[in-house]
Amino acid sequence: MSILDPNSDAKNQLKIASLVEAEEAFLAKARKNANSAYFSQNHIEPEKPVKGEPAKGVDPLQRPHNRRHFLASFAVLASSSVAGRAIAQTAASPDGKAPPGAVWRSVPEDATKIPGTAIGEDGGYGTRSQFETEVRWRFGTKTPLSSWSMTPLEHGVGIITPSGLHFERDHGGIATIDPATHKVFVHGMVKQPKKFSMLDVKRFPSISRILFIECSGNGLTEWSKPTLKTVQGTHGLVSTSEWTGVPLSTILNEVGVKSGAKWLLVEGGDSSVMTRSIPIDKAMKDCFLAYGQNGEAIRPEQGYPLRLIAPGYEGNTHIKWVRRIELSDKPFMTREETSKYTDLLPSGKAVQFSLVMDAKSVITRPSGEMTLSGPGFYEITGLAWSGRGRIKRVDVSTDGGRTWKPAGLQGPILPICQTRFRFPWVWDGKEAILQSRCVDETGYVQPTLGQLIEVRGLNGPIGSIYHLNAIQSWKVDTEGRVSNVHYY
Amino acid sequence: MFTTTKLFLQVTACGALFALNTYAVSADPTRYGFGEPASANDLQDFVSSLPDGRDLPAGSGTISKGKQVYDEKCASCHGQKLEGDIGDRLIGGRGTLVNNDPKKAPVKTVESYWPYATTLFDYIKRAMPFYTPGSLTNDEVYSVTGYILSEAKILNGDEPITAKSLSKVAMPNRNGFIPDHRPDHFKPADKHPRLR
């Protein structure tokens, strides 16, 4: 089951519509929540189409097929276990009170007049505030076992993605693996095939690096027309964590690489037994097997107890639940690196092993579906990242790319890591097109969508699917409403 | 085995190397001796998709047996005629890959797109059927692989399907892949951008 079915236009349209629907269900709720970035006191509901006719100016692909979910009330959405196939994870937990990851506590009128919660009442593991509601939301594939969920970038501050909000892509559900019995086998073109327990893995000298991981399918809905409305929808398949583990070079040295070995297969221990081939030079240079994420064990959905980190490579190569590594003289030509994750061009030829993620940036605030409260000062902020190294500069345009000014970069600026940029802006109340454009330390300049399509072509509604790293445009209208547009 | 002193010296030297190299991992000359040797028995159930078939298991299948397996285990997701449903469409689509039409998508299937038949065996063996992965015997996987390839008009006849025969199958899109040409160098952007 693929991210998008490359086999059928009708199916793709349905799937994209389903994703639009999930986003819309999320937005319907967020617009009424005063704490949400999408809160809008005077939000105008989109014109309801006459039954059977597409709404004026609304592409059928962008309009949810089933208005029921779109218009569903809060309570219905929260209590319904089957809100269609598009399930926006609701902010309310099953008890109807605290959002996921929070515990509901009664709110005193004045917190200075009554003692707070007893220390240790959380059982020793803290939760987030009950007032914070951002969640990943999931693409409505037919089965939630092969699906993905996106990071709410619009709420993010700094560069680290909270572990519980790191995007997910799973092909056979989230495996539950007991570290006490888990083994990693290393074999193939090695002098001594070996198996390692998690205790063995953790005895080796360790390293930590703060790195982004981005799914190469990030933004695939945006090739031919602006489709999703929020930055979570257009860019939410990228996240940053501090990862800790053991260098692959250490493990490979332990088994002894035979001369002639050029590639290695890394295999996951989930039900999809995910496999990808990695060039051995890359493995020796900077890949590592991570057991730590943001100071604790990696989360189950990130591959507990052990995942591969291949810095700067597309997310699919960062195999989760690693159970096996096999060395060979040739790439293994697995399903994921032949029939998927290859970029089909209009010529009929497909680019294979397009592993590195090109430089990309996006303004996260203000971004799609937010509303500016009136003319005046706003801080434009966002994230930039490159699989080839450090971000060297980010420029911001408020006039659709006619003029550019440098944004301030928040240090530390780390290689292959998201970098936060900021740009002070006084909105004059007129229409504006906000864009960011990054340059990495290799000199690579983030292209416009037009430039990218010139190189890659547009062979179908979702083009070559993967590696869309174009400049994102957010339009601010005279009412202060921000929307996703194509402007180049 | 290393003596403790020897190991200590090597670890110290290695630590100094790391200190110079804060994020690029240097080749580590030390062997720590952690982990156990993996036996042939430990490794016997692992399968890989190398196109020359060297990591595929023993066994053989037939197209007719493959149809039975398909109807029983695969058709509910991939369709009676391999046309796809919850699962991917498996056949058809030849001639659709060359395409410059933004409104019409190319049809990528085993028949039109997959470059190696060994990949098909490997994927079915590891990850299919979706709800009971790993439940098919090697002979069943060889058979159903053969059946899909026969419906795709790539294989026919009564020859047994084996690791060797799969490595020799000429897939229609065998030469359809090119290496990564990036990074691209983009020309200066249009000076007159507009809403599209």
Image: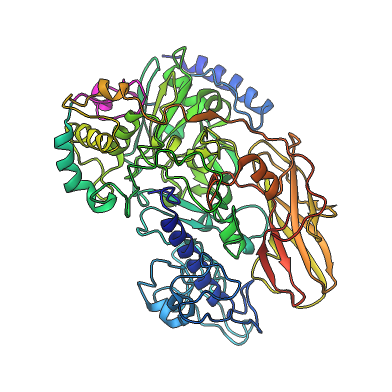
The extreme bottom residue here reads A109
How are the residues colored?
Answer: rainbow
Image point (52%, 80%), residue name: A49
Q: Which residue sits at x=46%, y=48%?
A: A302
Is B190 colored magenta in this rendering?
no
Q: Can residue B55 be seen in this snapshot? A: no
**Above/below status of A105 relative to A344:** below
Q: Going by the picture, which residue comes out furthest to the top?
A: A259
Query: How many numbered discs sit on the rendered protein?
Result: 0
Q: Residue A189 in the image: x percent, y percent? A: 40, 17
Q: Nearer the viewer, residue B74 or A320?
A: B74
Quadrant where the C terminus of chain B lies? bottom right
In percent of width and height, residue A198 lies at: 39, 37
Residue A193 at x, y percent in the picture? 35, 21
Q: Quadrant of the N terminus of chain B?
A: top left
- Counting from the top left corner in percent of width and height, residue A427 is at 83, 70
Find out whether residue B38 is within the magenta segment. Answer: yes
Q: Quadrant of residue A147?
A: bottom left
Residue A475 or residue A189, whichever sits in front? A475
Query: Most prominent secondary structure in the magenta stretch?
Result: loop
What are the residue bounds of the magenta stretch?
B36-59
Residue A394, placed above or below residue B169: below
Residue A245 visible: yes
Residue drawn at (23%, 47%) of the image: B74
Out of A224 and B58, give the one closest to the viewer: A224
From the viewer's perspective, is A362 left or right of B151? right
Horizontal side of A344 relative to A37 (left or right) equals left
Give the answer, above or below, for where A381 lies relative to A372: above
What is the quadrant of residue B153 in the picture? top left
